[in-house]
Image (cartoon, rainbow, N blue to C red):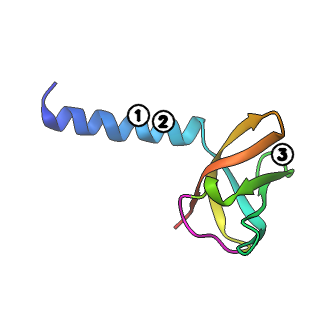
Amino acid sequence: MNGQNFRTFGLFTNLLFNLFVMETGTIKFFNEKKGYGFIVDDKTEKDVFVHHTGLLDPVTNNDKVTFEISEDERGKKAINVKKDE
């Protein structure tokens, strides 16, 4: 695979990943001082917890974001939260 094909393949797989894995939502509340908040998931309309360690970009209330959902012993949380542009 030459360099151009590799770049095209990379862009294509990134697009597929974002279409099928990433969730979308809106920041309902984020407290910078405490370092956490909630995202309203567009699909389920349920709140998803987000910790500042899960943010890729700074966010404020009502920002549109994409994110992944991770689950641990404490429940579901948003990770890799990126502000839509």
Q: Where on the picture, by quarter, is residue 58?
A: bottom right
User: Up-down: is 70 above or below 51?
Assistant: above
Measuring from the top left, give residue 49's x and y in whole percent. 79, 53
The tag on residue 38 is none
Labels 1 and 2 touching (C-beta < 8 A): yes
**Neighbour tally class for label 1: few under 14, some 14-19, many 20 plus, Cα within 10 Å:** few
Point 78% across, 46% down: residue: 43
Q: Give the amino acid type for the residue marked by disc 1 in the picture.
A: Thr
> Hey, what amino acid is under mark 2?
Leu
Q: Residues within 10 Å of mark 2 (few under 14, many from 20)?
A: few
Residues at discs 3 and 2 in contact (Cβ within 8 Å): no
Q: Distance between the Cα atoms at labels 3 and 2?
A: 21 Å
Mark carried by residue 13: 1
SS assignment at label 1: helix
The image quadrant of residue 72 is top right
Cα–Cα gap, marks 1 and 2:
5 Å
Magenta includes 58?
yes
Instruction: Tell me the residue that label 2 is attached to.
Output: 16
Q: Earlier in the sequence, mark 1 or mark 3?
A: 1
- The residue range painted magenta reads 56-60
Q: Position of residue 75 (x, y in %)?
A: 83, 39
Q: Quadrant of the N terminus?
A: top left
Tell me the number on the disc at residue 44: 3
Closest to the observer: 48 or 20? 48
